[in-house]
Image (cartoon, grey):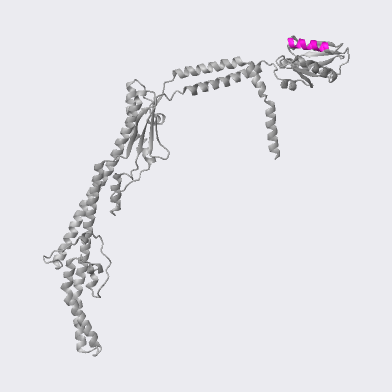
Amino acid sequence: MSTLDKEQLNLIDTLEDDIDYQQIIYSLYRNKGIVIAITGISLGIGCIHLSLQDKVWEGTTQIVIRSTTNNEGSSGASNIAASGIPGVFSAVNTSLKTEVAILKSPSVLMPVFNYVKAEKFKLGKDLRAWKFNNWKDAKLQVKLKKDTTVLNVTYKDKDKQLIVPVLKKVTDTYQRYSGRSRQQGMRQGIKYLEEQIDIYKARANTSMTEYIDFSMKNGLGGADGLPIFSSTDIKSSATSSPTTSKSTPFAQSFSASELKSQSFNPIDAETMERYRDNFELLALLESELSIKSSLLKPNSEIIKSLKRRIDSLEKSLSRPTVILNEYRQLKSQAGRDQNTLLGLESQISNLKLQRAKQNTPWELISEPTVVEDPIAPNESRILSISLLIGLLTGSIIAYIADKITNIIYSTQEYKSLIPYPLLKTILKDKPETWKKDIDLLASGPLNYSKGEKILLLTLGKLKDQDYYIRFEDRIKDLLDGIQLISNNDTQIINENVKIIIVASPGMCKRNELKLINEDIKFKANNVKGWISLE
């Protein structure tokens, strides 16, 4: 343990020694009248304060909040967002804490505040100092029940009849707000979808017209010249990657799935049939050129003729390949626009259906009720505080009054003020022990001899007390031939007298003891010590 820690412990021990709790209790007991009187006054003031206070009543109601992402109204928005259309509708996941903050905001509660002001004005109340935030903080409490979606709404007011209407006003206001918020979101979503439908209708009509015109111009339709759509063409929004089943340029214009599928568009079959002879002829010429090249020289007229025919045929087939590629692009764009339009129409129908259902995101699970007993003023609390203040104040005043009297009530204080040893503590209420105590004094500190003079120097009013007179008589009876002088007058002290100071708590004042100490300090050798009668 460090030196600093030891010093701190010594200081604590010293303070504990200096504080005599027993004497404090005795002091309060001696002045119990002051403590009782001040405590009574404090309780009286508390009762008066209690009677002047207006009673405050409290009412409660409970609301269950449903998360906006869990109700059916938002599922439509989620489907729209999932449709892949950029920016159609963004479903907002509002947290419960946000819902509570919204409910407590002025935009929602201001109508309730104005209603309360109007009702108070009817009662003749001065409302000039009323502020919304002060009213909300002092009167209204909106709090989520832990680990639930249950919202506790509590309202306090001095007017008991006003509490239930205010709570109903709060729930009605929240109902209107939540409905307005949902309706606004629905209206915005429907408006946006309608605008997109108009855009995609025009876009789908344009792409379809271009596709039909191109098909008829290049003879890529059916018997009537119009293109033929299968259900797969309309629903598909993208074409598959082309894979060649033949090495010809025409075959590369179509996917393998289209060539093999039973639902393949008839127009593609007719197109292939239209150019099949030319491709077959090209294949025959290329085969013949391969055979002739192995037999004839490169500059042979036959070889040159075959090459000219092959080049000419390839050039004639290059134009249909470009046309077919453009045809496929127009066909794909028309199908994609048509598919997007159908998706928009489906989503707006779903959103309108959800709006018609009108699911509210909250539910009132308990009717507004008022607690039977007022919550304020708290009688037990006010009276307890009054009692505590009275006891504390009375005790302090009683202790101060005890100190003002300047009377010494403690043997410990006598020890600190008398510069001589304490010979014996004698119990004044137990005279049966006096003989033993006196014999010990005579044989010990006094070293008494027969006929010797002893001065009992009493402090304060001790010599007039009955118990002291009895004690003095007892000494005379026990000590044969003693010449006992009992006085508090220091002028009679002479050199041949043994002095014993006799003190008793509550009999002497501090200033009196100080004077006696000054008078006998020149006779200090005569003073054997002091005894305490307690």
Query: Viewer-proximal residue, 63 or 208?
Result: 63
Point 33% across, 33% down: residue: 171
- The reply, left or right, for residue 326 in relation to residue 517 is left
What kind of secondary structure does the magenta stretch mostly adopt?
A: helix
Which image quadrant: the N terminus? top right
Give 487 or 146, whichever is nearer the viewer. 146
Q: Residue at x 69, y 18 (%)?
A: 409
Q: Indicate whether residue 476 is drawn in magenta.
A: yes
Task: Give the percent coordinates (x, y) of residue 513.
Answer: 74, 16
Quadrant for residue 342, please give it.
Answer: bottom left
Q: Is residue 351 above or below residue 103?
A: below
In the picture, measured across the screen, residue 392 lies left or right of residue 471, that is left
The magenta-colored residue range is 466-477
**Is any part of residue 505 visible from this angle?**
yes
**Residue that lies at the very extreme toward the right in this rendered image:** 450
Residue 270 screen position, x and y as percent: 16, 70
